[in-house]
Structures are given as C-alpha cells and as structure tokens.
Image (tube, helix red, strand yellow):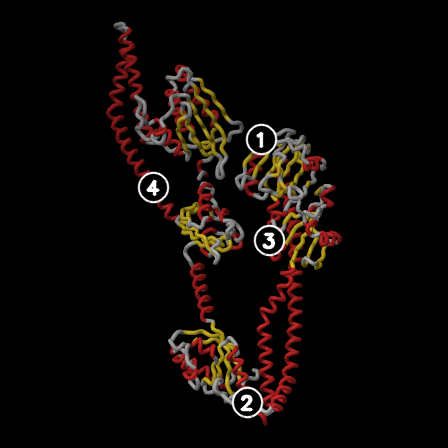
Amino acid sequence: MGPRPPKGGGDAVTAMADPIPSHHLALSIRRLLLLFLPLALAIYGMMQIHYWLYVDAERSKLAESQQLGAELSRKVVANNLNYMVSEIRFLAEHIQQRTHAGHLSPLEKQEITLFLGNFSRHRTWFDQVRYLDLDGNEIIRINQNKGNPQAVAETALQNKSDRYYFTKLASLPPGQVYISPLDLNIEGDQIELPVKPTIRVGVRVLNAQGDKVGFLLANYLGEQLIGDFERAASQIANHMMLINSQGYWLISPDEGQNWGFMLDHSKRFSDSYPEEWAKIQVSSTGQFESLNGLFSYITVHPYHAPARHPDVQLTTEAETLYWKVVSFAPNPLLNAPRQQFLSNTGLIYLFSLFLAFLGSCIITRARQRNDAAQLESLYERSFRRVLENIQLAAVIINPRGEISFCNDYFLKLTDYQREELMGKDWVNLLPNDEHRSGRYTNFLEALRNRQLAEQTESTLSTKQGQPLLLAWNNTYTFDADDEIANVTLLGRDVTEQRGIENQLIKLSQAVEQSPNTVMITNPRGQIEYVNPKFSRLTGYEPEEVLGQRPSLLKSGHTDPEEYQALWQQISQGKTWTGTLQNRKKNGDIYWEKTSISPIYDNQAKIRHFLSLKEDITDLILLEQEVQRQNEESHKNRELAAVGQMANMVAHDLRNPLSSIKMALQILSRAPLQPATDEIKELIGISQEQIRYMEGIISDLLSYSRPAKPKPEWLTLEKLMETTVIGLQKQIQEQGVDVKEYYQKGLPTLLGDPVQLRQVFSNLIINAIQAVEAQPDPKLAISVTLLMTDSNPKIRVTLTDNGSGIDPCLSSKVFEPYFTSKAKGTGLGLAIVKQRVDLHRGSIVLCGMEGGGTQATLILPVNPETSN
C-alpha cells in the first residue's frame, strides 16, 4: 500500500478552491521536498545499483556462456578424433583378417570392397575410404556418394604417393594411426567445389602373417566435426569464430571469410583484428575488451585430443598446430543490457518515483493537518491532473463501490460522458454475467477487507455494450483514521492483446492437434517446426529434425527433377501440391499428399515455407492391392482358360497323335516293300509336324499348371553353360557365333535349376530364330553381379543381331498366345515371364539401336529375402 489522493474528491474539472497563501505553499513545498528528495535519491541510488548489478550480471553471463561454449567445442573435437581413431583401427583389424598374402586375391578384394561399402553406408561421416598398396596405388576406393556408397572403377583409381598425407602415413611404424590437419579436399589437383573440409586418418595394414601389405586411409568429413562444434557452442553461435594458428578463419559468421589459406581471397582474422590477435596468441585462454568489442578465446589443440590412444603418431606440423575459439561480442551487443534495463525497469522506477511523490504529498498533508482544508483542493486537483495526463485509464472508487473520479482516457475507452458515471455504482460497467455470478459482491468484500489484489484484470462493458478488457493496478487510499478512503485503479486496455493471444493459442492448438503433418522451414529449407503428428508418423522426435532439411525423409524413389521443380515453384511464391514417397526413421516407405506454400512478412518477403501433408499410405497400398488382385484375377482366368484348353487338347489330340506317330514309325521300318524317296520324305515331314504339335501341347500344359519351384543353391555359370551345350545342335545348324562372359566371383543363387534352365533355353532359342536370316548371326550372353540396398542380384543379358523387336510390342511379348512368328502358340516368353516371377525376378525385352534385341533378366540371389 502507498499514499494516494485524499478521500472526498469531487469532479476534477469543476472542483474549485480559494487561493492558498504563498508562505503556506512554500512551507508545503519545502516539507514535500524534504520527504520526496531523499526518496527520489534513494530510488535513484537503488536504480543505479540495480543497473550496475544487472549490466554486470548480464555481461558475466555472456562471458561465461562464451567460455563454456569454447570448452564444450574443445571436448567435441576430442571426442570426434577419438572416434575417428577407433573407427580406422576397427577397419584395419577386420581387413587384416581377410588378407592372407601380399596381394589381394579377387575374392579378398571383393569381400573387402563389400565390407568397406557396408561400412560407408552406416558411417556417412566418412566421405572416402581407400585401401592403398605400399606404392600409394589405390586398390579400392569407396565414395560416400551422398549416402549411396559406390566402389570406384579400377580405371578411375589414382596414385597418392605424391600427397603429403601418404608420405606421413608411409613413415609410421605398424599399429600407429596418422591424423592429418583440417583442410579442404582436393580432387585432380583442384579444390573440390563446393568446398569440403576434410581430416584424413590412416593406418598401416598387415596381413594375417603380420607382413606389411598396404595402407587404409579414410577422409573424415570436416562438416561433421564443424557441425558438432557449432552445436556445442550454439548459445554463442552468431558470434563464434574458429581460427587456425596462422590466423585464418575456419568458421566465421561470414562464410566468405573461411579457408583463406587455401582459397584465393586470403582473408584472415589476424589482418582484420591485428591488435586483438596479438593478445590472443600470447595465452591459451582469456577474455578482454577492445575498441571493437569483447573478445573471449580459448586454445584448442585438436591433434592432441585422442588421449585414449597413446599409439597415435602425430606429425611434426600437427604438434605445432592449434585452433583458437574466439567469441566476439560487438559493442551493440555489449550495450544491449543497458538498453534492456531501461526498457524493462525504467517504467517501474518512474512509477516508483511517482508513488514516492504521491506518498510525500500525503505525508506532507498529514503533517500539515491544520492546513488540510486549504491544501486539500489544490493537492487533489494536482493529483487528478496527473491522472488526466497519463495515458492510462484512471478510476477512483469509494468504499461503497461508487465512481468518484475517472479521467478522459477512461471516458474515451468506454464512450461514456463524465456525468453519466460520477456517483454511479461500479457494477453498472460490469457485464451482466459477472454481476449475476456475484463477482461484484466479491469485489466489494475484498475492497472493504483490504484484500483487493494489487494487479487484476476485469471485463467492462462500453456504452454500446461492447466488452472491454483492462489490466488494473489497484492502490488503497486511507484517511486520518486509517479507514479506506477510496481505491485508485490505473488500467491498461489489453482487449486486443488478449484477443491476439487467444487466437494464437487456438491456432497453436489446432496445429498441434491436427491429424495431418505440419512442417515449417526457413527460406534455406531448414526445419524450424514440426507438429506431434510428424513424430507419430515418421518416428523422428522434433529435436532430431530441427535445423535439418526435409531431404532426410527422401526415399530415393522420387526423381530429382521433381524436387527441383518443387523448389523452383515455391521460391517464386507459388503453392506446390503433389504426392511424395518418403522414408520413416525405421526405414518404412510411406506416401504423403503434400501442399507447400510460402509465408510472407509485412515487406512481402518470403520468410518461411509451410508444408501440410496428409498420409495416404493406406490409400496407395489399397489401390496397389486392388490392382494386384485384378491382375491376379485376370491371370487366373487366363490360366483357367489355358488349363481347360490344354486338358481338351491333351485328351483329344495326344492319343490320335500317338497312334499316327506309331503308324509312321512302322511304315518307315516295313521290310516288305522298299519305300521310295518321296514316301520317306513324306514320312519325315509327318513325324516333324507331330513333334511340333507335341511341343505345343507340352507348352500349354507347362503354362497352365506351373510347378512350385524347388529351390537349391546353384552356380548360374554352370547352369548357363549346360543350357548352351544342350542347344549346341541348333546353334551349329544356324551357324550362330555365341560369346559368353561371366563376371568373376559370382555368388551362388537360390533357385529351381529345371525352371531356370527352361527360361534360358527359351530365350536362347528365340535369339537363334531371330538371327536365322542374318549373314553373320551372333549371340552375346553376359552374367554379372548387381549390388542393391536390400539384396544382391544377378543380371543376365542376351543380345542378338537379328532384325530387332518393334518398340510397340515390347510390353506385349510376354502375354499368353501373343506371337509375331508364323509358327508357335506364343507361350514361350509367357512361360519365361511366369518362371521369372516365381523367382521374384524381372525381365525386359527391348530393341537395340542399329538392329538386334536384348533380353535383360534380373534374379535376386536369395528370393526368400527379396522385397
């Protein structure tokens, strides 16, 4: 409680009083000053003390956060380097177990390549992993390739003997690890663009007998270390810099200043801040203030970090290298606490001075009780003028709940005239529902019991009945007998503010509870918000994706051109809608119907992108299932028709054909009368046609009643060679030149040898028939290994130089009964497709440029684990 205007005040506009003698006024002012000035000085002193304590605390907090961020960054570097050493040693030990001689055998090379590829797939922070021989020649190199590791072809492998890191690595004794300085990656004697910060870590490789056989060298992506470094110092990230021992920026708020020791701009911190750099160099850690601002720094020795690995060998240069973590707080940031103090507490101290002034006035009035009659009107007018001039609603209520004063600001808010409110009950301004609920009765009870809260909010009704929400500061005024004289209410209109807050709360709740995924990114595509539905759908928690790009959800099944068109459209301020196929955290694929729209600021500049996504996976899967069932139903109807026809043909034709065949055989062997050449020719033609008809019947039965595969592990190379040998008679009759190629180290394949041999036999026979009219008939057979994400596969290609296939027919050749030949039922390729489907493979038939046809068959090594 504090002193307030005396009770019994009338209308501040009409109240009049007799002139007060000047000596009384002077006495009142002197008494007032004697009370107010010490209070004002005390408040001013408290404000000064509060000011310096606040500024000092804020600056100390800033300094502590800078030092803490630097220390965390140093620990992050140590942990990353320890991890690199552990990983390279792990690789070396596993490769040593697979190496038994000085030179890698093809099988050993293949196993190591697969091992390093799988390692790179799960260790995406290694950009390249190399296996080099003792002369610096790359034997194996695995490129990360943006999360899809690939082994570099032998023709693209390089010699690294002239690189500094190979020289250092080659000089190490066995078992010790080499770590290079942090610099930019170089490919083909040129800095790779965009720039790629790299640390190289290597170790010598021994074979199982302990002999030197080569080196293992991995390129660790510096972006990983730098990203961890920046996240560790996130509280000072906007002002944090990382500088090497030569004074060049490795990290700065302006990316154009980085890597000056390798790029053409040659910018460095030591040139921009020479005096500060001189101070920073002389000690390992410290903090000082210069004309430019506050500098906090700590020294990081990145190549001394792997303390847990005492056998790590450091180069002479690495032992002298160090980094300086510098946090620069410019003068505007240093001065921010001063401005914040004035902004946050200035009104409070001003109001305190106002309260001190009012209190001094009341005390002066009490001390001059004999002069109260003359001074009361003057003081009241003065007080009410103050209330009239402040930009707050001011209302004085007596203990009966009647309005005894209100200022113009309050009248303007409520649209009432002064005479409409003076002497009226305060209840008249409260909404009816509040009046009926008894809240006004509670207000009067709290007022009379001196329990009225210092700060309250209440809803009033304007003259037109519109609700008006005000936040009040309530202050009691007491008379000489310590009874409540009145209550002064100073209010601020918060109607619009609370309305906006409520609207934001509703909007926030709608987004949080939305059944669809909501994502907000900045213009650079970095995620700034995801709603709970996103986490439930993808399995990613918000902290895992904030700052990341939506590309972490890519499944790899959407064309890059579609993403490029998406970004181009939304960057132009347009809304993009479409369907995306993405991947969850657990690897599951799902589909989303997506709408992405730009969000503008008040300058019509794009500040964010809003993405609304609806999970339509169930709908897509339902459509696919319906389509599959329709296809299966169609296929079953075809098979039923074929089965009926095959049974009919077998029943009606097989017995007569057998009789005719037996009769022809008897005639051809009859000794009674020698057959003429013409008769022998007719008998031969008849037997050939019978064999042709038997083949048709066999195809019909084979297609209509496909046997379930009886899989066994087999060598595809031997199966193909056996098939070719079985068709050697037809190959020689047609004079076909058959070339075969089998990739070395092919794995065994789980399949039915009888069905697969039938597939290869049908394809080879088709190729032989296709080149009959060619002067130089040729057939090329190739069997190679195809690596995929889920399961290795074997690719078989048969290429002939025949007349080729019509592109319009490439999708129809596998349909039952479709044929472009004069003879045949059109079931040969249909049987091929049927057998391939049973092995969960795929086959494509297409024409070649310049003539000829190529059949490409892909079979999973293990169909039981193939997706």
> In the drawing, what numbered circle is on residue 231?
3
* Disc 2 target residue: 376
**Mark in the foreground, 4 or 3:** 3
From the viewer's perspective, is residue 167 above or below residue 725? below
Label 4, label 3: how many angstroms apart (C-alpha)?
Answer: 49 Å
Taking depth in this image into account, of 31 and 428 the one nearest to the observer is 31
Q: Is residue 766 visible?
A: yes
Q: CA distance from mark 3 to mark 2?
A: 65 Å
Circle 2: residue type: Glu
Residue at 46 percent of width and 46 percent of height: 567
Query: What is the CA distance from the residue labelled 4 to the residue labelled 2?
Result: 94 Å
Q: Amino acid at mark 4?
A: Gln
Q: Are marks 1 and 2 in contact (CB under 8 Å)?
A: no
- Look at the numbered disc 1 and give the secondary structure of its residue: helix
Viewer-nearest of discs 1 and 2: 2
Find residue 156 and name its label: 1
Residue 384 percent coordinates (x, y): 52, 83
Q: Earlier in the sequence, mark 4 or mark 3?
A: 3
Q: Position of residue 38 (x, y in %)?
A: 66, 81
- Whole-percent x, y for residue 515 in the image: 41, 56
Residue at image location 28% in from the left, 31% down from the top = 643
Identify the residue position indicated by label 4 in the image.
627
- Give the answer, above or below, for where 827 lies relative to 470: above
* CA distance for labels 3 and 1: 37 Å
The amino acid sitting under disc 1 is Ala
Residue 276 location, quadrant: bottom right
The mark nearer the N terminus, 3 or 1, is 1
- Decide which of tag 3 and tag 2 comes sooner along the chain: 3
Can you say which quadrant of the picture contains the C terminus?
top left
